[in-house]
């Protein structure tokens, strides 16, 4: 690894459109929502859902399996039944505590160019996180391996439209379960200099991620309490249950001031009511109850409101994604998150098992739900396939193209004397054309979005090139990008320190 | 053809979800936009574009090739130069005339169930109109034939999500050019009882459509002057030119009170400025100038504001569709149309040459532009492929699925005590599931959108069924639907009258 070379390349990538062979992408750049959100619910309807969710927390309660978490709630004056593991949260307490969550905060990357803002109108796109399987056109669907996981993370680094790594693209099933997160974090730290997401499965595992994230920046965990540098997803066990590993993860993250993306998996008709209003009320209760716990651990700790409501296929009971109900729930969840002034997380999802038209339209339905809902963090932004069981190399490229298009769409139309072009229209006159005019020549290189994957050739040229559909082209693109990958610079001493940490922890874990 | 059977079937189709073998689709039903539009321009920016477009009409003018049209403008006090064919439209005249265009009107179908409302918040989805080529997975891309054109129109009748036929899905290139429109109209009238779009290429051809549309309803052209029953697209020849066939078509439509969808083909960088603001100003000038002509022919005649702004690929000069610029222009065009209180037309477009992920995401980008822009008529709603040169049988099904999803998305979330489901959440309790509860059982059959094309099966079942992607499934669906097609009822005397008309006109045309 050449440190100097890595640094120079990283600067170049962020200063201009770069061509990788003939692959073009805009530079890394965070953007914000310029247009008003779409509100699918009235203010009154939002209040009904809000009030119902507070009643759920107060009267039905949440089952909290971790004793430390129950103690925290009890200390705050909640009615707690340790035998039934039930916690009943007073609406006044919830209202008071969630108000401490910051509306905006910064996530600091080890490469400052990749530092990003969370909340407000800021948008963050992530790569997929968590599937068990990996897939590509050449080898089909298969178990994830560490080597291929590293390839996927390299592409996450290469694709400028990805602002935040997604928490490991898929499980490296060829590595031992207990220490797999340590190898993942080494890959996340050394193969990308973007911010990444850790595994928050229990106190120790979460602390590993926090330790390693700090180390990568030459800091200690105590240094980062007011400087978020890593994020994670905390799932409730819907309906209304918080399990031990997730509660421990949340508490550890909150102790160190690191942001948790609190996301119930409310699948309408299965883990929540068959009606969207009821599902949103339950989702809201689970998010608010869990945020209350985070704020009780450390007031003002950053959290994100995660909306992941979808519905089941009532014929089979299996989850469906990117449905009209999903879109509606995403936009409604954005409204709820904004009601509390808490950053909002949504996702890019599909049920399709292959990189076809269905994969694209279900993803589009979910991303429009998110974008019109003013999403702040789009988790699983690129690479998700097959209901989230698969990370696909081709879908990664397809999604990157779509996300780039959303970023371009979010650059508002400029209206001024120059752009209104009255003189150019006069010069060209009726029946003429604008190809050669100075108004066109001055602007044509940057006037329009340049695609990464789309083929705009006419039929004859397209067939001459081999009639390749977008999945086949995506396959070529990720391979070309991977061949061009260069590791970002990282101090050799830090790499050694990280490797020592992992070695030490692995020997401890294997001794258990 | 059995008339009785046809009628019964038609009733059934509109009363309940129907299963065609195992193909399910919601009944024919027009819906309206329930949420606020997305406004990508400020009110001030809209005024700048509006004012620039009036300056264009006043100072640059429009080239109007048809003498009758120039005379109409001259009679209204416009400055006209018959030698240069230029017409200069005073802004006061334009402002006055466009105010006569109705904000809403009804299009009457021969089957009253298929009568639709245009304007306001009403949505109309159409089938593709006008390509030269047809394509399907079995035979690839080829010249259109009458037989296959009839098959496409049959599917237009079968698909309940299509509210309006698109004007002939593709050219029947096996028929003589001069009389082809007559055969098309026979097919449109007899194979579907939905409203259709005529060919408005000159006075005589347009009058043929008006005559035949009237005849099909047992009316004369004089009867329909205040009862719109047929529509057409009038394209300006951008920049700023109205040719003879289109001007004649517009004048004839206006004389008989039939709606023209006035649509400039403003391809930014080629037929209009490379900047979107300039392109929108030019588009607006062309639409307003042409609407002025229609209103001068017959004050209050129904018209539709057509927005079709896209951009060229600056590398090749060929048009690109479903780009971020396209989405922005669609939403901005919706704002302009609403400023004038005139119904708004947009489109569902893609550059892709095959029914792949690109076809789906470009279509989605354009339909979200239209839907967020409060489109009233989505022309080319289903079936457009390859930059509009191709009508695809599989894309027809793919689009129908996507349009059905937009219709489902446009059913707002119900929020009330029943749907908030507090009792169900209480009954199920933390850690339970909602599958068997009475709250679920009472609603599961209608709770969620049921797909036409999407496959939500898990990977194992999907591979067992043959790993079919959505294009292959679409191929099976249109064939199954076509096999189930039944002709809608039509009085035998009317059919004979239509055939006589066509015979007579054909002998006249061949005598020329």
Image (cartoon, coloured by chain):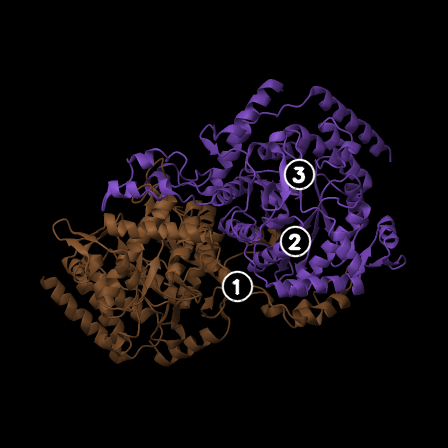
Chain colours: A purple, B brown
Location of residue A491 in the rendering, given as x and y in whole percent from the top left corner: 69, 21
Same chain for mark 2 and mark 3? The answer is yes
The residue under label 2 is A337
Location of residue B73 in the rendering, given as x and y in whole percent from the top left corner: 19, 59
Report the chain holding disc 1: B
* Image position of B427 with respect to A169: above or below: below
Tell us which disc is closer to us: 1 or 3.
3
C-alpha span from label 1 to label 2: 24 Å
The residue under label 3 is A106
Question: Left or right: A56 with respect to A138?
Answer: right
Report the chain holding disc 3: A
As drawn, which residue projects farthest toward the right?
A83
Residue that appears at 48% across and 39% down:
A472
Same chain for mark 1 and mark 3? The answer is no
Observer-nearest of A404 and A461: A404
Question: Left or right: B464 with respect to A234?
Answer: left
* Residue B355 visible within the image: no
Q: Dot 3: what SS?
A: strand
Observer-nearest of B299 and A317: B299
Location of residue B78 in the rendering, given as x and y in whole percent from the top left corner: 19, 57
Q: Dot 2: what SS?
A: helix
Number of residues whose C-alpha sits closer than 10 Å to that of mark 3, classed few (under 14), some (14–19) or many (20 or more): some
C-alpha span from label 2 to label 3: 18 Å
Q: Residue B447 occupies which quadrant of the picture? A: bottom right
C-alpha span from label 1 to label 3: 38 Å
Number of residues whose C-alpha sits closer than 10 Å to that of mark 1, classed few (under 14), some (14–19) or many (20 or more): some
The residue under label 1 is B408
Question: Left or right: B104 with respect to A361?
Answer: left
Number of residues whose C-alpha sits closer than 10 Å to that of mark 2, classed few (under 14), some (14–19) or many (20 or more): many
């Amino acid at each position: 690894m050449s440190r100097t070379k890595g640094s120079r390349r990283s600067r170049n990538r962020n200063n201009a459109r770069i061509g990788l062979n003939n692959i073009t992408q805009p530079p890394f750049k965070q953007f914000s929502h310029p247009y008003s959100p779409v509100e699918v619910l009235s203010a009154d309807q939002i209040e009904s859902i809000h009030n119902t969710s507070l009643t759920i927390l107060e009267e039905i309660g949440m089952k909290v399996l971790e004793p430390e978490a129950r103690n925290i709630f009890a200390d705050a004056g909640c009615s707690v039944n340790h035998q039934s593991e039930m916690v009943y949260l007073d609406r006044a307490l919830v209202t008071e505590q969630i108000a401490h969550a910051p509306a905006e905060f910064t996530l600091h990357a080890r490469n400052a160019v990749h530092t990003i803002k969370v909340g407000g109108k800021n948008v963050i796109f992530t790569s997929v996180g968590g599937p068990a399987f990996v897939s590509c056109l050449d080898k089909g669907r298969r178990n994830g391996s560490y080597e291929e996981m590293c390839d996927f993370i390299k592409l996450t680094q290469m694709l400028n439209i990805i602002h935040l790594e997604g928490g490991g693209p898929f499980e490296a099933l060829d590595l031992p379960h207990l220490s797999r997160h340590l190898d993942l974090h080494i890959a996340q730290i050394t193969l990308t200099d973007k911010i990444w997401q850790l595994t928050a499965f229990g106190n120790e595992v979460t602390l590993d991620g926090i330790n390693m994230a700090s180390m990568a920046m030459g800091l200690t965990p105590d240094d980062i309490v007011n400087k978020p540098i890593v994020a994670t997803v905390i799932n409730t066990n819907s309906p209304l249950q918080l399990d031990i590993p997730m509660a421990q993860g949340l508490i550890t993250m909150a102790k160190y001031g690191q942001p948790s993306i609190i996301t119930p998996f409310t699948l309408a008709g299965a883990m929540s009511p068959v009606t969207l209003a009821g599902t949103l009320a339950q989702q809201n209760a689970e998010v608010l109850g869990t945020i209350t716990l985070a704020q009780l651990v450390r007031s003002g700790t950053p959290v994100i409101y995660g909306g992941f409501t979808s519905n089941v296929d009532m014929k089979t009971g299996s989850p469906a994604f990117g449905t009209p109900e999903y879109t509606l729930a995403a936009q409604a969840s954005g409204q709820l998150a904004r009601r509390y002034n808490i950053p909002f997380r949504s996702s890019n999802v599909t049920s399709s098992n292959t990189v076809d038209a269905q994969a694209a339209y279900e993803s589009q339905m979910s991303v429009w739900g998110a974008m019109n809902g003013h999403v702040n963090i789009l988790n699983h932004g690129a690479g998700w396939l097959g209901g989230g069981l698969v990370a696909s190399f081709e879908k990664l490229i397809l999604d990157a193209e779509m996300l780039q298009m959303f970023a371009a769409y979010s650059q508002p139309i400029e209206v001024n004397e120059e752009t209104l072009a009255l003189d150019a229209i006069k010069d060209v006159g009726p029946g003429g054309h604008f190809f050669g005019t100075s108004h066109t020549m001055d602007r044509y290189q940057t006037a329009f979005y340049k695609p990464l994957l789309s083929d705009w050739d006419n039929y004859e040229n397209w067939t001459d090139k081999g009639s390749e559909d977008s999945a086949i082209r995506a396959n070529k693109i990720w391979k070309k990008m991977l061949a061009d990958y260069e590791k970002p610079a990282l101090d050799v001493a830090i790499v050694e320190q990280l490797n020592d940490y992992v070695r030490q922890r692995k020997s401890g874990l294997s001794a258990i």
